[in-house]
Amino acid sequence: MQTKQTKTAQALSASFKVHAENLLTDIQTHINTRDSLQKNVILMRKSKVKLGASRKTCAMLAFIFDGLTQLKDAKGKPLTENTCNNYLSEIKKSVTKGTELTLNSSRKAKPAGQSQTPKSKDASKLVDDTETDIMASTDDKPAMPKVGAYKSNDDAIAALVASIKTVKSQCTIAQWTAITTLHPSTAKMID
């Protein structure tokens, strides 16, 4: 027997589904990105370029390092010099020794059967400090979408195009490439 959902429950359910779909898209992007990283390392290896001892003596390592300094973390901040050095070291090791590229080598692996998640006393580390969680809000009801807010299909499409342009402007090149790979019609809407 199906129960009828209240408007609040429907809004929460719709919000959760959107976030779940975004999570699944990000997981697919992560999987594709890891595969792409490995393919690029293999192609670098096949180029037969020999990497030097350090970025101070090797132009190729300096080139990679300079590129790494242009990247930003998930919060939009430039990667630290230490992070760039660690990534460069891992890239060099992967290219020269043929090992799988991992950018989390400083993370110590737990023994088999143990969780990578923090202990319960560190549960705060599992929670994002932004207050975007709809369930954690006060008793205010979430804003319901206005049905019929767009007078025509053209108005609705214009709003979609504007939203897509906003999202594109806030993505890194790699993110936008991954999004358009997964959903090619998205890029076509703003062309």
Image (spheres, rainbow, N blue to C red):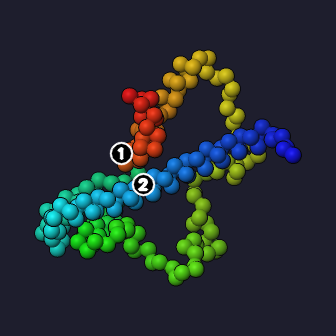
Contact (Cβ within 8 Å) of mark 2 with mark 1: no
Tell me which label, 2 or 1, sits earlier in the chain. 2
For badge 1, the amino acid type reads Ile
Q: Nearer the viewer, mark 2 or mark 1?
A: 2
* Closer to us: 147 or 113: 113
Q: For residue 18, which quarter of the picture?
A: top right
Residue at the spot 45% in from the left edge and 34% down from the top edge: 185
Q: Is residue 47 visible?
A: yes
List the single residue furthest toward the front. Answer: 46
Please give left or right for residue 114 compared with residue 164 in the image: right
Task: Please state the horizontal and vertical placement of residue 180, each as a whole percent of the image.
Answer: 42, 41
The number of numbered badges drawn on the structure is: 2
As helix, strand or loop, the secondary structure at mark 2 comes to helix
Please give left or right for residue 88 compared with residue 23 in the image: left
Q: For residue 152, which quarter of the picture?
A: top right
Please give left or right for residue 49 compared with residue 28 in the image: left
> Badge 1, how many Cα within 10 Å: few under 14, some, many 20+?
few
Q: For residue 30, which quarter of the picture?
A: bottom left
Task: Please state the horizontal and vertical placement of residue 62, each as a whole percent of the image.
Answer: 18, 62
* Closer to us: 8 or 50: 50
Residue at the spot 15% in from the left edge and 68% down from the top edge: 50
The disc label shown at residue 173, or none: 1
The disc label shown at residue 32, or none: 2
Q: CA distance from mark 2 to mark 1?
A: 15 Å
List the single residue furthest toward the right. Answer: 1
Task: Please state the horizontal and vertical placement of residue 183, each as a whole percent of the image.
Answer: 47, 40
Task: State the quadrant of the C terminus.
Answer: top left
For badge 2, the amino acid type reads Asn
The disc label shown at residue 154, or none: none
